[in-house]
Amino acid sequence: MAYPGELSYRQILVGRFMSGMIGLDEIFAELYEAGRAPDEALVPELLAGARKDNYIPVVAEADYAAALLREYRKYNEQRESGCACRTDYGTWRGILREQIPWYPTLYEHLCDDCGKCVSFCSEKVFAFTEDDQSVYVASPLKCQVGCAECARICPPKAIAFPPRTVLQAFWG
């Protein structure tokens, strides 16, 4: 296993929760250079590659598989378009946004899909699914660190954030 500082780091949405993953950029680059298409047949290889440096619980394997394939598809699209860059989410107090554990969790069993969070959030963190039937967290890392106003305005209280104390480590 490589040391975390030697490999790339990114947070990805796995199911409804963000998960920090080590070494994905290296896995994706290797697959892309080998001409591997981002299709379902690649899932076992993505999982095996990710497991080299990350813990993937067996009970969450399907969620990780979907997330890894989605992220590789994005990577592949960027490379095909000539942009080999990752999305720049900026920094907060000099720290890369991806390294700050601040993003909303949407509890689907409570959400009534009213869309107040979608229209309220200027950062477009929330969106409706393609069929416009339900709300989901589309871009969790676009969420402004420390902001939780969407949770306040959510009528069924379906949005939650980590406790603000998680940010204290970054205030020093």
Image (tube, rainbow, N blue to C red):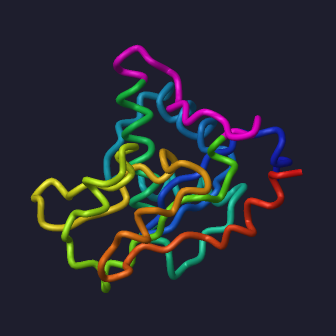
- Pick whichever, 140 or 68, lies toward us: 140
Residue 90 on image: x %, y %: 60, 33
The answer to whether residue 56 is left or right of residue 52 is: left
Inspect the magenta stretch and tell me whether residue 92 lies in it. yes
- Pick whichever, 141 or 24, lies toward us: 141
Q: Outermost residue toward the top?
A: 82
The answer to whether residue 32 is left or right of residue 153 is: right
Answer above or below: position of 30 versus 69.
above
Answer above or below: position of 58 versus 47.
below
The image quadrant that residue 129 belongs to is bottom left
Residue at left offset 69%, top offset 39%: 96
The answer to whether residue 13 is left or right of residue 94 is: left
Residue at left offset 42%, top offset 28%: 35
| Magenta extent | 79-96
Residue 88 on image: x %, y %: 55, 30
Instruction: Specify the principal SS of the magenta part.
Output: loop
Q: How many marks do you count on the picture? A: 0
Answer above or below: position of 79 versus 163.
above
Residue at left offset 89%, top offset 51%: 172
